[in-house]
Amino acid sequence: MTRDVINEIRGTKTVPGVCMICPWHCPTENFVKNGRVEYVRGNEYAVNATSRCVKGISSIHSSRDSDRLLYPMKRNSQGVHERISWDDALTQIAARLKANKDAFGPESLVYLWHLDSNETFTHKLFGELYGTPNLSGHGAACDQDRRLAALETFAHPLPVKDYANSRFVMLWGADPFGPNEALHENRELLESMKKGCRLVVVDPNRSRTAEKAHLWLPIKPGTDGALALAMAYHIIETKSYDQAFCDEWVHGFSEFAEHVLSNEYTPKWAETITGISRETIIAVADEFALTKPALMDGLKGLVNYTTGLDALRTVFALNVITGNIDGPGNLILKELAPLDMPVDIPEEAITATEQLPLGSAMGYPLAPDMPTQLLPEAVLEGNPYPVKSLFFHICNPAQSDPNTRLFEKMMAAVDLSVTIDIYMSETAQLSEFVLPEASTYERAEVRESLWAGPQVVFAQPAIEPLGESKPLYEIMKGLAEKMGYGEYFQWNSWEDWARKQTAFLPVTYEELKEKGVWEGELRYHKFKTDGGLATPSGKFEIYSNLFEEMGYSPLPGFSEEHRIKPDAEYPFQLINCKMQYHCGTHTQNNPYLMSIVSENWVELNTNDARRLGIADGDRVEVSSPQASATISAKVSEAVQPGVARVPHGHGFGRRFGTLARGKGTHINPLFETRMNPVSGGISFNECTVNIRKI
C-alpha cells in the first residue's frame, strides 16, 4: 500500500525518517496526525523497504514517553539534579571546557557516542575547533575486532553481506535471526535458503539462527580461531583455493600458506581445541571452498573474546583466498555516497594538538575506537595524560561496560561530565550536566545506511521536540556560540546544512526531501575497476605489514594465552547475547516491548541445572571474583554444559524509567577489565562464575 493511500485512509501525512534503534539505520516513513506519530514503516522508495522489526515499530513510544528528559539539568551540591536553562547550561559548560583546555590541553576532553547521530557537528566543534583527538564511538564494546580485521584486510571498516545471491553462508558467533537487526539482510538470507543456499552456524549455543541452519557447529567458547585456521589448512593442503585470484589480488598468500602449514593447524589439531570433529571440519572446508558464490562472517560470538581479532582475520582470509569477496553472494565492500560536510572549518581555525589519541597513547595504536576500559585510568591517575572533561551522547557505559564500580569511581572524580540523551540514563545520573536531546522523530538526519550499495537516508523532523529537548546539531551550535566559534555554525534551519551536505548527490534536493532516500548503483568487484584497494599494496592483505611494523604478528594465529577459563571455584563461563525484543538503553522503558519480555535471565544446560537442583524460573545467585547478582534461571538444551548465557546482559536492571526501573538484572558488574591485547575490544565473554540456587 503506497504512502498516499495510507494517508488518505488514516488522515495522516508522511514524513521520511530513519530508525536509530540499531546501527542499520533503516529508511522509514513516519505517518503523522495532529502532531503525533501514529505509525511507522519502511520507506517505500528504498530498495531495502522491508516492514519494520518489532523494535523499530515500537520506537514511536519514544516520541511520547512521559519519562523523557525534557529540560537541561545540573547536579547540585547534594547530588540532586535540578532544572536549569539552556543558556545557563551551555554558558557553564563552555566556561569549564575553556578552563580545562587552558590548563590541561584540548586532549583533556573525551567525547563518546553510540549510533553516531549527527556526530559530524561534534567532530567540527570538538575535534577541529577545540582540538581534542579523543572523539570515539562505542566500538570497543561492540565490533572493534571485526572492524580492525576488516581495515587491515580490505581497507574497509564495515563489509556487509549479499545473502540474496549466495549459495553458501557460514556465520561465526553471529545470530541475525535473534536480535533481528539488518532486517532486509535477514529476509534475503531466508529467501536465499529457500532457493537452496546452505547455512552453517558456528556458535557455542543453539541460537535462533542456529535453529534454522542446515548445520550447527557447537564450538567450545572462544576457540573459533582454531577452527578457521584448520579450515584454511585443509583448503591450502588440497589446493582448493582460487589460485588465479590469489596470484593477482592477494598480498601475502604464500606467507599465509606457509604459516598455516608449518604450524600444523590441522583439523586433527583443532578437533581437541574446538570440540568439532576433524571430519566435520574437512567437510565444511570443502563445501565452502567448492561452492560459489559463498561468504562467511562473524560478530559478537568472536569479538567478545581475546582471541576474536585473529579469528576474524582468519575468517576474512578464508573469503579472500577462495575469491569470495565483493562479488554477488559475497561479503561486499560497501561503497559510500558522495556526501559533503554540513559545516566547513577553515584551515587557519583548526586547532592541532601534539598529543596522541588516548588509545594510541595507552598502547593501542591500531584500535579503531577508544578502548573505553582504559578511560578510568586516564581520569583517576592522569595516565598517559589528564582527562578532565567527559561527554556521553546516547551511550550508557554505566550499564554497558564491564567493571561498573570503576566507572562509577571515575565519574565521581572527573572535573566535568555531560550526558546528552533522551532519558535520564544511569550514566546521566552520574553526570554533572544532563542535556535533553530530541528523539529521532523530532530531528533531521542525513545518514548513510548499511544497505550494500551507496544509500543516503534523509530523515526530517516529523513532530516538534518534546519539552525543551533539542537536536544534537542545535546543541553543538549553542555550545559553539558560547565557546566563541559561533561564526562557523550559522544556519537558519536544518535545511540550510542539509542542502549543503547533499549537494553532490545526483538528485535534486526537492526529490530527495520528498522520497527520503537516494540510492546509487550496487557495484560488484569495485577493486577491479577502481584501480585496486586502498591498502598499501592495492590488494587484499592477509599478511599485514602494518601489524608487523607495530610489533604484532602480521599473520593470524591461535593462542589462549590471554583467555580466562572456568576452574573448580568458578566452573561456568558466563557469555552474553542480544535479545530479539530489546536493544540498548532505550527499549526497556517501552510498554510494547516490555509487555513481550520484561526481564533477562541466565540460561543453563539441563544437566548442569539438574546437578545444582535448579528448576526453570528459580532465582539463582551468579558470582564472579568481582561481584554477585541475582537473576532468574532458564533451563535449556540450547546451551552447552559449563556455559551460562545471559541475554542482553547490559540492558536490564535499570535505575530510570517507570517501566524499566528494577526490571531484570544488571550483570556487567561481574566482569573485570579484559580486552583484546591489540584492538582494545572488550572481552565480555571471558568471565567465569559460580551459580547457586537461592
Image (tube, rainbow, N blue to C red):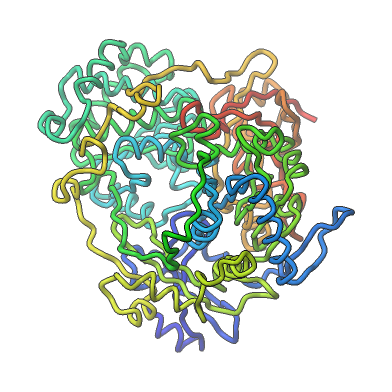
Q: In which quarter of the image is the C terminus?
A: top right
Q: In this rendered view, identify the residue nearer to me: 156 or 459.
A: 156
On screen, 319 above or below 459?
above
- Image coordinates of residue 122 in percent, x first then y, are 53, 59
- Image coordinates of residue 221 in percent, x first then y, are 50, 25
Quadrant of residue 467 within the rendered picture? bottom right
Quadrant of residue 311 within the rendered picture? top left
User: What's the residue at 43%, 68% (across, down)?
Assistant: 342
User: What's the residue at 38%, 55% (across, down)?
Assistant: 450
User: What's the residue at 23%, 15% (across, down)?
Assistant: 258
User: What's the residue at 31%, 22% (across, down)?
Assistant: 281
Question: In the image, is 398 to the left or to the right of 293?
Answer: right
Q: Can residue 266 be seen in this view?
A: yes
Quadrant of residue 48 within the rendered picture? bottom left
On screen, 274 above or below 157?
above
- Image coordinates of residue 28 in percent, x first then y, are 44, 69
Question: In the image, is 176 to the left or to the right of 583?
Answer: left
On screen, 680 above or below 176?
above
Q: In this rendered view, identify the residue nearer to me: 496 or 694.
A: 496
Question: In the image, is 562 to the left or to the right of 166?
Answer: right
Question: In the image, is 684 to the left or to the right of 301?
Answer: right
- Image coordinates of residue 224 in percent, x first then y, are 41, 26
